[in-house]
């Protein structure tokens, strides 16, 4: 699987058909996951940052508090600059820099992540996908080889505070959104439990994941992006 950042494969919820996604090394129990799911949902609905402390003026480390369930809960979001990913094409790196992008890291990250590449449109071409944090929002950007790097596709954009989840190791909230490259076989295996399992495709997809859940596959089919939910 081609990727620039550290793979999420060893940390995301395992899929029955041999996907290599796994729990975080400090695997959360089912009861804790349900509790954290409720907390994450409350944060998504009620999160209003009360304070933020940057690391200098770079914005690489943000800490503060959000209101969840009537309580103030601490959070921390780590981000990396674009130049942390030297294999990014210069044109893509320039476009990200022009947008003011930093690359958010999940709270369980073991290395740089959330910058990936694969053949998302057709076999033989190299496309890129990036999570871009800018101005309090996170966007999933796709740079296709057939398109201009100045006009990437925006597959999803949300408030960054809506993607916070409790980290069992620290007790505070952290960023929970990760992307990875998924091969045709991995996508097809992930569809094994579907009532009407579609045929395998011939190019890669984007595995869009929350840390404690099975991924949603975002695939370009017939010129349109389709979300395949395997949960």
Image (tube, rainbow, N blue to C red):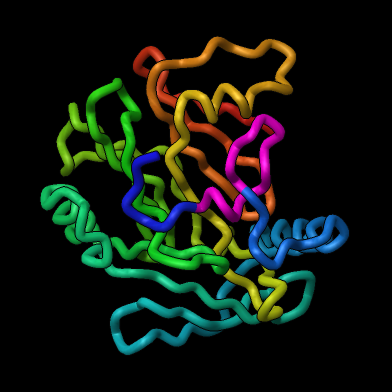
Q: Is residue 10 highlighted in magenta?
A: yes
Q: Which residues are magenta?
A: 8-21
The image position of residue 191, as x and y in percent, is 64, 23
Residue found at x 14% / y 55%: 94
Front residue (pair 110, 45): 110
For residue 34, side relative to residue 165 (left or right): right
Quarter of the image with the N terminus is top left
Q: Quadrant of the C terminus?
A: top right
Q: What residue do we see at 29% from left, 84% from top?
A: 57
Instruction: Give the answer, above or below, for where 10 lies relative to 128.
Output: below
Furthest residue in direction right, as rendered: 31
Q: In the depicted view, which residue is nearer to us: 58 or 129?
A: 129
x, y (%) of residue 125?
A: 23, 28
Q: How many marks?
A: 0
Which sits in the foreground, 33 or 6?
6
Residue 139 placement (x, y as % from top left)? 40, 50
Query: In the image, is 168 to the left or to the right of 86?
Result: right
Residue 207 in magenta stretch? no
Residue at coordinates 60% horizontally, 46% vertically from top-left? 21
106 above or below 206?
below
Which residue corresponds to the image point at 78% horizontal and 70% vertical from the top-left? 69
- Residue 2, given in percent of the width and then of the height, sits at 34, 41
Q: Main secondary structure of the magenta part?
A: loop
């Amino acid at each position: 699987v081609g990727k620039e950042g550290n793979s999420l494969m060893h940390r995301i919820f395992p899929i029955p058909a041999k996907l290599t996604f796994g729990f975080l090394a400090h695997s959360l129990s089912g009861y804790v996951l349900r509790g954290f799911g409720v907390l994450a949902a409350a944060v998504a609905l009620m999160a209003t940052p009360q304070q933020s402390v940057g690391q200098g003026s770079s914005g690489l480390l943000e800490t503060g508090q959000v209101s969840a369930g009537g309580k103030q809960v601490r959070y921390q979001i780590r981000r990396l600059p674009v130049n942390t990913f030297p294999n990014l094409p210069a044109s893509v790196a320039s476009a990200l820099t022009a947008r003011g992008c930093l690359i958010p890291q999940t709270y369980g990250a073991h290395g740089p992540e959330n910058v990936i590449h694969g053949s998302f449109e057709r076999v033989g071409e190299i496309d890129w996908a990036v999570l871009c944090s800018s101005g309090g929002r996170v966007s999933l950007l796709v740079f296709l080889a057939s398109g201009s790097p100045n006009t990437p596709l925006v597959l999803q954009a949300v408030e960054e505070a809506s993607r916070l989840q409790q980290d069992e190791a620290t007790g505070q909230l952290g960023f929970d959104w990760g992307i990875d490259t998924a091969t045709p076989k991995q996508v097809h295996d992930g569809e094994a439990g579907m009532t009407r399992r579609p045929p395998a495709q011939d190019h890669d997809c984007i595995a869009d994941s929350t840390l404690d859940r099975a991924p949603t596959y975002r695939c370009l089919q017939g010129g349109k992006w389709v979300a395949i939910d395997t949960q």
